[in-house]
Image (cartoon, rainbow, N blue to C red):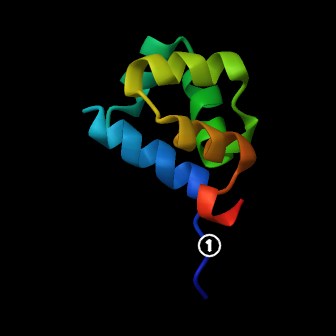
């Protein structure tokens, strides 16, 4: 049985790769000032990121406005 991938998680992961962090999630969390455990928990449930945490991540990986809305709402703009 296939599980449905959270669109917000897909956005976050693709932006992390595009920003050059790839598999270096620990470094990204540290640079964003988010503890490793909190970062991984939020990455698995993107709707749980705080506004402050999203701002810090955005300063590193540069989400588009549409991506930020999708992360906050937990859906893509096509599904809104």
The residue pinned by badge 1 equals 4
Residue most toward the left? 20
Say if 54 sits above or below 64 in the image. Answer: above
Position of 8 relative to 78 (above/below): above
Viewer-side residue, 37 vs 17: 17
Q: Nearer the viewer, residue 39 or 75?
A: 75
* Mark 1 neighbour class, 10 Å CA radius: few under 14, some 14 to 19, many 20 or more: few
- The answer to whether one can see residue 76 in this image is no
Residue at figure coordinates x 38%, y 37% from the top left: 16
Residue 72 on image: x %, y %: 70, 40
Who's the residue at 47% across and 36% down the image? Answer: 64
Query: Looking at the picture, does residue 3 appear above or below residue 78?
Result: below
Quadrant of the image containing the C terminus: bottom right
Look at 61% across and 88% down and name the residue there. Answer: 1
Single out the residue that lies furthest toward the bottom: 1
The residue at 54%/42% (across/down) is 67
Q: Is residue 75 above or below residue 40?
A: below
> Which element carries disc 1, helix, strand or loop?
loop
- In terms of depth relative to the viewer, which is nearer, 18 or 65? 65
- In the rendered structure, the answer to whether residue 69 lies left or right of residue 32 reads right
Total count of labels: 1
Residue 19 position within the rendered picture, expressed as x and y whole percent measured from the top left? 30, 32
**Can residue 27 be seen by looking at this rendering?**
yes
- Percent of width and height locating residue 27: 37, 21
Q: Give how far across and how far down residue 40 sits, in percent.
A: 57, 37
């Amino acid at each position: 049985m296939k599980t449905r991938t959270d669109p917000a998680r897909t956005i976050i992961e693709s932006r992390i790769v595009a920003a050059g962090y790839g598999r270096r999630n620990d470094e990204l969390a540290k640079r964003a000032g988010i503890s490793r455990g909190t970062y991984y928990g939020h990455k698995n449930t993107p709707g749980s990121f705080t506004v402050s945490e999203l701002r810090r991540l955005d300063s590193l990986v540069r989400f588009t406005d549409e991506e930020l809305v999708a992360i906050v709402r937990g859906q893509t703009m096509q599904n809104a």
